[in-house]
Amino acid sequence: MMCVVERAELPVPREDDGGVPDYAGRTHLQLRFRLRGRDLDPERVTNSTGLQPTCAFARGERRGGSRESAGWQWWSTWWDKQDTDPLMDQLLQVLGPYRSVFRHEVDLGAEATLSVVGEVYGVVIGSAEEAERRRYAWGDGSEPFEPFFASDRVAVGLDRDVLEFTLPNRSTVDTATRCPLVMARLQGLPAARGPPR
């Protein structure tokens, strides 16, 4: 089994005018392409592509339900913006030339998954005064203020080139982003854990 896990650094919060840490705009995203299958040979995929996988394991090398399948994974670099287009460009540049290899593995029974994972940091805005101080628009004033979570909005772009990569491989496309609530004023603590493994 070979897995190289590179974790993103926790974001350094900005301090707003009131001295409260502000994590809004501190997004960390990564793209992960995975092949899994009972009869998948990760060494065959590595030899056919010439690419070094981020993680590869033979059947029986993992614990739990993963024991019954083998896997080959490629992970992009970490990206600190909510737009995923640069990650998709990296996918196409690195893996695109080998789509026929991945299609062959799918034809042999492997499952392909393309995931966007990471964390979207933000802060709970608890009052109209705080929203105004931080320059957030929260309504037209006709409704009473309701607390909200201020954060980036992740935009997953699946343009024609990305779809041409994923569809022939019958890839599942999913997202797994977490939004840790930063309530520094209540807890006096910095942000939660780092991005998922």
Image (cartoon, rainbow, N blue to C red):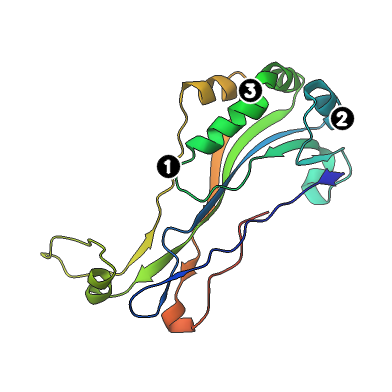
Secondary structure type for disc 3: helix
Q: Amino acid at mark 3?
A: Gly
| Residue 19 disc label | none
* Crowd tier of the residue under label 3, counting other residues whose Cα lies within 10 Å: few below 14, some 14–19, many 20 or above: some
Q: Which residue position is annotated with label 3?
A: 96
> Can you identify the residue that label 1 sits on?
155
Please provide percent x and percent y for residue 4.
Answer: 78, 48
The answer to whether the residues at label 1 and label 2 have Cβ atoms under 8 Å apart is no
Q: Is residue 146 above or below residue 179?
A: below
Identify which residue is drawn at 47% across, 61% down. Answer: 121
Q: Are discs 3 and 2 less than 8 Å apart at CB?
A: no
Q: Mark 1 falls on what kind of element?
A: loop
Q: Between marks 3 and 2, how big is the CA–CA gap?
A: 19 Å
| Relative image position of residue 98 (x, y in whole percent) | 70, 20
- How many tags in the picture? 3
Q: Which mark is residue 43?
A: 2
The answer to whether residue 87 is left or right of residue 41 is left
- Quick check: 27 above or below 87? below
**Mark 1 surroundings within 10 Å by alpha-carbon count, few (fewer than 14), some (14 through 19), many (20 or more):** few
The N terminus lies in quadrant = top right
The residue shown at (18%, 61%) is 139
Mark 2 residue element: helix
The reply, left or right, for residue 92 in relation to residue 148 is right
Q: Nearer the viewer, mark 3 or mark 2?
A: 3
First in sequence, mark 3 or 2: give its number. 2
Q: Amino acid at mark 2?
A: Glu
Residue type at tag 1: Ala
Q: Mark 1 or mark 2, which has the lower sequence index?
A: 2
- Looking at marks 1 and 3 on the same chain, the residue that comes earlier in the sequence is marked by 3
